[in-house]
Amino acid sequence: MALTREQIASIATLARLDLTSSEVPVYQDSLSRILDFVGALDRAQTTNVAPMSHPLAGLSQRLRPDVVSEQDRHEQYQANAPQVAAGLYLVPKVIE
């Protein structure tokens, strides 16, 4: 799918990119190739392919136990703060 210069300009505006005129063709080519690749993936025949959770059958990821390894020291840290209320750090207002 070939993108036009206008489409690239619109995408750049939405992405808040300030593209120079020399960068537009580079982005035009790159994004067009990405969309062509996605189109090729979309056209791939997958009707007879069984869904899988892992590409290597019989293997799974080793997971570590979900245990707490750090002590809760928030009271110790908040003791050094200039202002604390209800377990939250109070900071000066910066927007009027």
Image: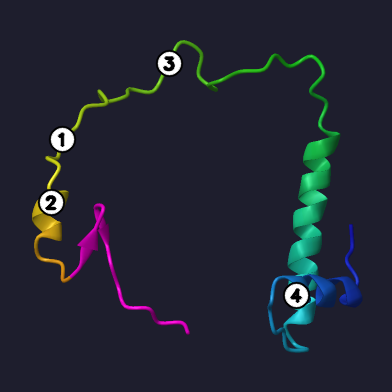
Q: Are marks 2 and 4 in contact (CB under 8 Å)?
A: no
Determine which quarter of the picture holds residue 90.
bottom left
Q: Main secondary structure of the magenta part?
A: loop
Q: Position of residue 87 (x, y in %)?
A: 24, 52
Q: Which residue is mark 4?
A: 12
In the drawing, does residue 6 fall left or right of residue 77?
Answer: right
Q: Give the residue drawn at x 38%, y 23%.
A: 61
Q: Nearer the viewer, mark 2 or mark 4?
A: 2
Please report whichever mark, 1 or 4, sits nearer to the chain's N-terminal start. Answer: 4
In terms of sequence position, does the residue under pointer 2 or pointer 4 come before the other?
4
Which three-letter amino acid code belongs to the residue tagged 1? Ser
- Asked which secondary structure carries label 3, the reply is loop
Do the CB atoms of the residues marked 1 and 4 lie less than 8 Å apart?
no
Identify the residue shown where x is 12% and y is 57%: 77
* N-term mark: 3 or 4: 4
Residue carrying label 3: 59
Cβ atoms under marks 3 and 2 closer than 8 Å: no
Mark 1 or 4: in front is: 1
**Amino acid carrying mark 3 in the image:** Leu
